[in-house]
Amino acid sequence: MSKTDLIVGLQWGDEGKGKIVDHMAQSHDYVCRFAGGHNAGHTIVIDGKKYALHLIPSGVLNPNAKNIVGNGVVLSPKDFMKEMEQFDDLEGRLFLSDKAHVLLPYHAQIDQAKERMKGDKAIGTTGKGIGPAYADKIARGGHRLGELLNPEKLTAKILEFFSINKPVFDALGVDAPNEVELLAELQEYKDVLGPFITDTTQMMWKIMDEDRKILLEGAQGTMLDIDHGTYPYVTSSSTVSAGACTGLGINPKDIGKVTGIAKAYCTRVGNGPFPSEDFGSEGDLLRKNGHEFGTTTGRPRRCGWFDAVAMRHAVRVNGVDQVSLMKLDVLDGFDEVKVCVAYEVDGEEIDYVPYDLEDAKPVYKSFPGWDKTEGIREFEALPDTAKAYIEALEEMVGTKMGIISTSPERLDTIIR
């Protein structure tokens, strides 16, 4: 029986997982998404053409790969159908778990209403409804994709849910859907998505027994994990490698090589602690050079230096075998490049991620910069200072930088 390869983000999301999943998907038979919703975004550039994926696994860009959306995902049918329009002939190449939870428009309304109510204490969500959809799932009030196959019954269940929770919805200013419109909406979802809905757990077991090559991809990053991230400024799902087990119905022994994805610097979207954030001109330059604006929201990302402390944490939590270092070229032209090597908390210097990062101050080590790495495809061709930077990161985080990306293009990738 084959083991699955796994790709996981090691920072606060937006690490560039899409390019590496696309790169690795060329040699895999199946690409499987195990968590998150359409708040995530993968941007992939192939021959100058840009693809922005939110729910469909990145293997869709390999005509020979099949794609599975697992039960750990919360899926917005409306947004998924819109994303499907980019591609032809998906039937037979795309499979949706009948146990994945459905995210409906009222979830987004709840999300946005709660953020408004929190005022300056808002988490900074995308407002897409991810948290409320997962909350319904955990509170056993959610609905699964398999229920779309009976729109009449699902319509009745949703209206009953609104009736039972009317005081809550009234307080949030969220109106119950119109019965006729809701039924028509769910019927459309059934018509379009019905052929793709199946028992993907049985499917996963079968393709592993057949020794197929399988690649697993998540969404967001380790520091946004509901348990291991900077809570409460996190997403609502398990973004770490262990989440692949619950999100696809496989067991820990089924997972083989784990590749962690990290930028050569750090970014974060939304609120929450970010110790190595740079508030000055260098942070602005990172944002400009890295085109750091959200794939899903268009929001400017907060930018800062590589955080080796958080990275060690992420490498251990995920059991990372190798790191794929993304966007090395964004650091081109800096006189010096900084790395956060420790935190100062209450006057004490620590080398681990504490319970609360809110008051952690970065302790930096500086490295000489370099002129140009963009487009380089061989490690030995990199400037000596860039090679020294990479080798120092390997020592600090405790694992090899096995893949290095030097531009958004698929082929501008160093394999070591």
Image (cartoon, rainbow, N blue to C red):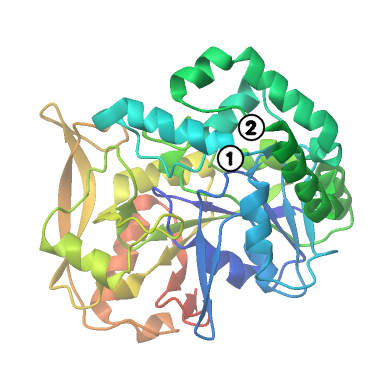
Residue 227 lies, in percent from the top left, at 48, 29
Measure the C-alpha gap from mark 1 to mark 2. Answer: 9 Å
* 314 with respect to 386 (left or right): right
Residue 141 lies, in percent from the top left, at 67, 22
Q: Is residue 231 something that shows in the picture? A: no
Q: Which kind of residue does numbered mark 1 sit on?
A: Pro
In the image, what residue occupies the spot 35% across and 34% down? 123
* 284 with respect to 80 (left or right): left
The front one of 46 and 309 is 46
Name the secondary structure under disc 2. Answer: loop
Q: Is residue 340 something that shows in the picture? A: yes
Task: Check disc 1: other Cα within 10 Å, few if <14, some if 14-19, many if 20+.
Answer: some
Q: Nearer the viewer, mark 1 or mark 2?
A: 2
Name the secondary structure under disc 1. Answer: helix
The circle drawn on residue 132 is: none
* 300 with respect to 243 (left or right): left
Residue 391 lies, in percent from the top left, at 33, 65
Kindly check if marks 1 and 2 are in contact, taking CB atoms under 8 A apart as contact: yes
Residue at the spot of label 2: 177
The front one of 246 and 177 is 177
For marks 1 and 2, the one nearer the N-term is 1
Q: Which kind of residue does numbered mark 2 sit on?
A: Pro
In the image, what residue occupies the spot 48% across and 80% down? 409
| Residue 369 sits in quarter | bottom left
Q: Is residue 181 above or below residue 388?
A: above
Residue 79 lies, in percent from the top left, at 61, 53
The front one of 305 and 401 is 305
Task: Check disc 2: other Cα within 10 Å, few if <14, some if 14-19, many if 20+.
Answer: some
Residue at the spot of label 1: 105
